[in-house]
Image (cartoon, helix red, strand yellow):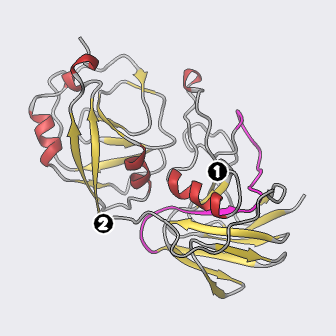
Amino acid sequence: MSHIEILRAGVLTTCQDAGRPGWGHLAVPPSGAADRPSWRLANQLAGNPTGACALETTLNGCTVKAHRNVTVVVGGAPCAVTVDGRPESWGQPVKLKAGSVLDAGPAEVGVRSYLAFSGGLHPKSSLGSHSTCLLSGLGPAPLADGDTIPLGPSPAHPPLPTQWPAPWAGVADELVMKLHLGPRLEWFRPDAVVELARGVWTVSEHSNRIGLRLDGPTLRRNDTAELPSEGIVAGGLQVPPNGQPILFGADHPTTGGYPVIGVVGPEAQAAAAQARPGTKIRFAPIPMPHWSRRA
C-alpha cells in the first residue's frame, strides 16, 4: 500500500481525525483534532471527507516523504512550507510527486499545524478512530523519525483548485472566551464570577492536548471538599484546590473530583488549541438560565 514516511517528527506530531466520542462511560476521552476548524478545512481543500485522518504538529512542524503522487494541504498554524527545498504555499493544495519531500516548518504564530493528504491517512485504528490520545494511549503512538503511515485511496473528488485567500482563522495574541457558567458555580464564592469577568490569565508552559493550565487570579471556593467523581466535557474550566483553573482540551479526562465553574464552546476550544505558553486569556461569563441551575 502507498504511504508517507516521517523524516522529521518534530516535538510532537500525531495522527488525528474526528476522534472517538461516545465512549466516556468507559473512561475513553474523545480525542481527535484539537483545532477542529483548521483540520476540517485542510481536509476539504485536499478533496477529502471532512472527517479524514491528518497529521497534527506541535510548534516546530515536521518533514514527510511521499511514496506516491499525492496532494497535501498544510494549514492551521501558519508556517513555511517547502517541497524538495523550494518554497510552496501554506494553506493551499500542493502536489507532491512520489519521492518528493515536504517540510512544514515551525509555527510562526499559534501551536498546531495540520497536514492533510488526499485520500487521508490510515494508521491503526482503535474504537473506530485513527486518533492518537495522549491520556489513554489509544490510537497510534506519537510519531517518530522513520515511521510510515498508509495512505487511503485517492478521493473521488479531486482536491479543490487553488483559492486565495483561503478562509483560515487568525491566531490572536490575547483570547476572549465566552464562558457558560456552571454546573458547579455554587461551590465558589460570589466574588469568583467577578474575578472571572475582570481577570487575565496566562497559558502555562505546563499545557498540552489534555488541557491548558492557566496562571492568574485565584478563584476561591466556599466549599473545599472534594466532589465525588463526575463527568467532564471538552471546554470545561475546572478549578483545583490552588484556585488556578485548567481549561480541558481534546484528550481531557472523562471524570474528575474538582468543581467545574464553566464551559467554553467549540470556537473557543479551537482558539485554545493554538494558544502558546504566555498567551493571555480573558473570560466573558454568561449566567446559567434559571431553569438549568442545580437545586
Q: Which residue is mark 1?
A: 50
Mark yes or no: residue 254 visible.
Answer: yes
State the image coordinates of residue 177 (x, y, percent, origin top left).
29, 48
Which residue lies at the image location 49% right of the left edge and 72% below the top edge?
78
Towards the viewer: 118 or 145: 118
- The spot of residue 272 in percent (x, y) is 39, 52
Q: Is residue 127 magenta?
A: yes
Q: Is residue 7 visible?
A: no
For label 1, the SS is: loop
Amino acid found under the numbered disc labelled 2: Asp
Main secondary structure found in the magenta portion: loop
Residue at image position (59%, 36%) is: 136
Q: For the magenta stretch, what is the residue range?
A: 108-128
Residue 115 screen position, x and y as percent: 64, 64
Q: Image quarter for residue 100?
A: bottom right
Q: Quadrant of the N terminus?
A: bottom right
Above or below, 234 against 50 in this view is above
| Image side of residue 57 versus residue 264, left or right | right
Counting labels gives 2
User: Could you tell me the amino acid type at mark 1?
Assistant: Thr
Asked whether residue 184 is drawn in magenta, I would say no
Residue occupied by mark 2: 173
Return the residue nearer the eye: 60 or 169.
169
